Amino acid sequence: MKLDQRLNRWTALMVLVLILVIVYFLMFHQFFVSHSGLNETINDLDVSRQKYINQAVKTPDLKEKLRKVKAMVGDNEEFLKAETTNLGNAEITSILKQIVNEQIVNEQGVESSECQIVSQQPSQDRNPDQFEKVLLRVRMRCQFEIFSKILSRIEENIPLLFVKDLRIEAQNISRYRRNKNKDAKQAPGNLEIRFELYAYLKNAIEKEDEK
């Protein structure tokens, strides 16, 4: 009888423990897990807040340094000499033409048909930087070797020139044959090349976060 009573007590105790475990998982476990995740989120936010505070403390000094840099541009030859956008467009167009002519005009002054500037069109700068930008959309027909040399000269040029959105396509040969009588200068094997060429004026742009 005493053995049965002890077994009954242990059974009852185990059942009670099992019930408590079930109640914990049903009612309290999710609560503690949620609060644990919330504490981690709060800690992350606190770290981010401290970073923003530290950055905000530095901002006035950074703005002042940026103003000083812009004011010291002066006679820096890496910028275009032009003072206005229109004059800048004329200057960058002239520079590109000179670079291309260096590669395609022979010693007798005869212009080769292996590379041509088809069109040059000024474009609006939709993503202004710290200084005013002059942007030119260029379309060319050129042999690869010559265009490689032109790119090298653009990279070495002073004032600094930059190229973006470069696209190179093979020219349609059959189209060339149909139009060869209309355009005698156009040589077969040339590539269709499009890119945007840009340079900077010395005119500084004051952005909203610098005011």
Image (cartoon, helix red, strand yellow):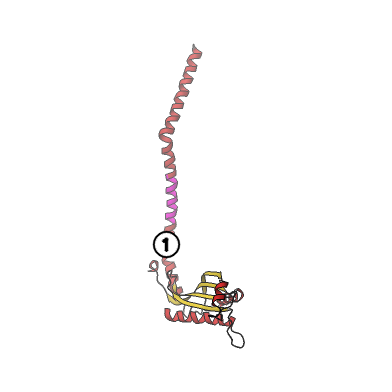
Q: How many numbered dots are placed on residues in this image?
A: 1
Element marked by disc 1:
helix
Q: Position of residue 96 (x, y in %)?
A: 52, 79
Give the residue displayed 54% in from the left and 79% down from the top: 116
Q: Picture quarter containing residue 142?
A: bottom right
The residue tagged 1 is: 57
Q: Main secondary structure of the magenta part?
A: helix
Q: Position of residue 121 (x, y in %)?
A: 46, 76
Residue 45 colored in magenta in the image:
yes
Q: Which residues are magenta?
A: 38-50
Residue at the limit of the structure toward the bottom, as seen here: 108
Q: Position of residue 44 (x, y in %)?
A: 45, 50
Lateral position of residue 189 relative to residue 37, left or right: right
Lateral position of residue 191 relative to residue 38, left or right: right
Nearer to me, 97 or 17 = 97
Could you tell me if residue 144 is visible in this image?
A: yes
Relative to 41, residue 161 above or below: below
Could you tell me if residue 75 is visible in this image?
A: no
Residue type at the position of mark 1: Val
Nearer to me, 29 or 107 = 107
Number of other residues with Cα within 10 Å of mark 1, as a class: few under 14, some 14 to 19, many 20 or more: few
Q: Position of residue 15 (x, y in %)?
A: 46, 23
Q: Which quadrant: the C terminus?
A: bottom left
Residue 60 colored in magenta in the image:
no
Give the residue displayed 43% in from the left and 63% down from the top: 58
